[in-house]
Image (spheres, coloured by chain):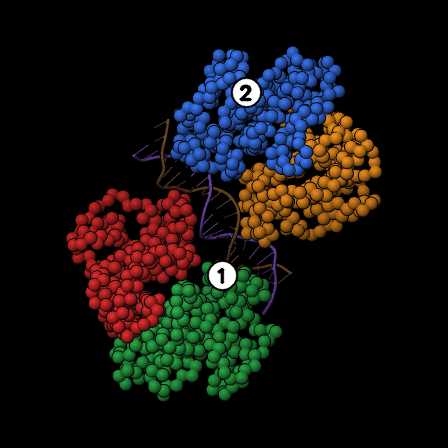
Chain colours: A orange, B blue, C green, D red, E brown, F purple
Amino acid sequence: MPRLSPAEITMQLSVAKMTSIRQHSALAFAPAKQQNERSFNFKLSFMDKRQQILEATATVMTEQGIESCAMSKVAKQAGCAAGTLYCYFDTKEELIRALYQHLVSSMNNACLNGHDGSAAIKTQFFQFWGNFYRFMLSSPRNRSLFEQLSASPAIDETLRDEAIEPIHSVIAQLLQQGKEQGYIKKLPDELLTTMTFGSLMMMAKKQQTVPECFRSEINEDDLLTVCWDAIKS
Amino acid sequence: MPRLSPAEITMQLSVAKMTSIRQHSALAFAPAKQQNERSFNFKLSFMDKRQQILEATATVMTEQGIESCAMSKVAKQAGCAAGTLYCYFDTKEELIRALYQHLVSSMNNACLNGHDGSAAIKTQFFQFWGNFYRFMLSSPRNRSLFEQLSASPAIDETLRDEAIEPIHSVIAQLLQQGKEQGYIKKLPDELLTTMTFGSLMMMAKKQQTVPECFRSEINEDDLLTVCWDAIKS
Amino acid sequence: MPRLSPAEITMQLSVAKMTSIRQHSALAFAPAKQQNERSFNFKLSFMDKRQQILEATATVMTEQGIESCAMSKVAKQAGCAAGTLYCYFDTKEELIRALYQHLVSSMNNACLNGHDGSAAIKTQFFQFWGNFYRFMLSSPRNRSLFEQLSASPAIDETLRDEAIEPIHSVIAQLLQQGKEQGYIKKLPDELLTTMTFGSLMMMAKKQQTVPECFRSEINEDDLLTVCWDAIKS
Amino acid sequence: MPRLSPAEITMQLSVAKMTSIRQHSALAFAPAKQQNERSFNFKLSFMDKRQQILEATATVMTEQGIESCAMSKVAKQAGCAAGTLYCYFDTKEELIRALYQHLVSSMNNACLNGHDGSAAIKTQFFQFWGNFYRFMLSSPRNRSLFEQLSASPAIDETLRDEAIEPIHSVIAQLLQQGKEQGYIKKLPDELLTTMTFGSLMMMAKKQQTVPECFRSEINEDDLLTVCWDAIKS
DNA sequence: TATGAATGAGCCTTCATTCAT
DNA sequence: TATGAATGAAGGCTCATTCAT
């Protein structure tokens, strides 16, 4: 299968065994190993401009940092005039919020991939957070974006909650089951989630930004085991 | 006794056993509970100007965010003219780097407080990371600063390494001992440290920014236990 | 019967004595009290586009001020695309000039309503300026438009003269007669007209924008008497 | 007496017979004929920058119209950088308001010149409105500014009232006396004032913008007589 | 050292106008 | 004719930095 241009990837329609239709673009790749289903590629002659702009924003923000992510730079990157941005987004803030939503949506899809609520708790845990970790690790772009956007004043609590919502209930159920079955510490969900999230994010960041500091190769399973040991009772 | 930094001179005169001279200023408090020596704080009417400026920068940055931390605002907060800032720092970037160094220095001191290389591994671990966590949790200012500064393009890897250096060896030794004694997982130091650091930072942030999401009170010991369980073999 | 402007055709079908065909549209109403003939208004579902655009321009300009009267807003208000405006008017300036002409044309008609060159001078004066005053007072829209357009750099002296032309001769004759008959001061026509015009415009504006400053009700006859006393010899 | 530069005029200190110290600059001349007092000129080597900016604003606004009065143009005219404007005025609106206040203050001074509350009503009337008319007529700049500023959304009712305040009471008293003595129509003050003001403003404008339309020279006394006849009972 | 007025590049945003469809 | 996406020049404003005092 030839390497697809971002546009093509973006519009790709993946038909998996089940109902899990996922959209991914250069903005947010699902880990490559999970693209093993048959897929029909609709080659569209035009990339949606809105998409192009989001793309460009992501690029500039990743390469130059959110502070130097000027609308003029985004426009240049997107190959259009500055004014054009405002045909698609009312303000810069709006653009940033849209990018965040897009990104989180991709992350959600990635995390939920292969989720099976009836599997063993530990299995579910490894599956979910493994997805999350690979999502962040496999794309420095995604991780950097996520970090910068999350810290931006443009993203308020409401938007954050709203965006995270789809995975929130999954995690809650997982922890609930785990606690009931005696596998997981009887600590607040938020605590357990926050610490797992925090340690994996930090690891992904370190590996991307200072890979040389890890003398030996980092094994994904080791990481997840560390996380699991942290919360298991 | 080594030459003291302006902060130490101006902010505090610690009368205690000579071995426990700690640096703190409004910029970075060590947790209050560890200030159990008698100390006389002399609020000097002319604080060293450089210090005043760092102070002001921290204040503005905390209150308004790093994006709106304009030099003019810093000057105003510091009670001096904008031009004066440039008598002490060549550029804004320089100022930010100095603030980062100052902050990390405080953090280092806080973390090392009461450290005893001969104590039991778990004890050392709890002591060290307990210090760290309290440092971050007790001062939203410190935590917020640390986060914003760490993400700033002004702070490069070299500076980061250099600043962290003082605690690096302590952690390395702690982990080394732990591994040798079979208490700690045989995983790379960086991995163990990064994950502990990441989870505690994230927790401190969550508690400061969205405290309402934790239904019940968070117990510091629970957190440290989670961290310990994560890395213990 | 001369060819009618789109406004006349589309906005109204006046069934009255053939001598009193008046032009009015939402753009410029003649005072209601003078609509004492039976009239059938056919609101046509497809108003002439050019008219629609003028209409929309007037609305936007009145509601938002001439400074925020953007072509895109006009288009939206007119229910068409921005580009369409340029099918009817070469430039924005052109559009503004057309609107001015349209408005002044309405004003002229209003002023001349019921004019009788053979009536007594004072009667003629009251009739004419009464018409004018009611035209301005009864429609904040007309008055506001007139003021804003008159001040616009798009309206040059030539256009102004040209637009006013129809009533110019009427006024000139009225004043000429008045002077000959000894009723009116022997002062330049322009002076007499300008002052009357100025005082009535200013009054209409004040009443529309700061009505509360007039403690008692303003009587139209008082106003016209003031104007008459001003110029009568 | 040599022609003074604006700066010199601005800072001029007029020592008149009485206590009437008036300040005028190019922004707002008092009518020339009233500068017949001895005056001491203090030649200042620097013109106050704030004044310079107001000056420049007035110039640009007069020459190009309020709509094209861009901050960059003002800066250029003032001979400084765009940013400099913001050292003296927080926003463009602020600048416009300051200019308005400055202008109205000059107008007030001009109007009140030689006012004598004990003189005959008609005399007071001629004095006051004569002053006003000359103020407007003698400086197209003042008149144009006044008109444009008065219509600007930056000037709210509060500022207007506040600025006019000094002459308001004088007029009120004049009219009150006039009505009591039976010289003036028993009509609302606002009506009488508005109409007088409106007719004189309009006359000044016409004479400045289309002087050729007045075939013969306009006599100031004629104008004031017209105004007086308008309101006298 | 200290000042703070001045600078001017750069930011976000608006809008009249064009042009391929 | 009609569309509306696209353009890019301006506009208001901010701010790191300089420099004469």
A206 is higher (above) or lower (below) than A7: above
Q: Amino acid at mark 1?
A: Gln
Query: Label 1 neighbourhood size at 10 Å, few (<14), some (14-19), many (20+)?
Result: few
Q: Amino acid at mark 2?
A: Gln
User: Residue at left 83%, top 33%?
Assistant: A120
The Cα atoms of the two marked residues, 2 and 1, are separated by 63 Å
Side of D123 where B154 appears, left or right = right
Report the residue marked by disc 1: C64
Give me the chain letter of mark 2.
B
- Nearest the viewer among B109 and A111 is B109
C78 is higher (above) or lower (below) than A175: below
Discs 2/1, front: 2
Query: Label 2 neighbourhood size at 10 Å, few (<14), some (14-19), many (20+)?
Result: few
- Nearest the viewer among B202 and B97 is B202
- Nearest the viewer among A69 and B23 is B23
Residue D194 visible in rendering: no
D105 is higher (above) or lower (below) than D219: above
- x, y (%) of residue B141? 54, 31
Report the residue marked by disc 2: B35
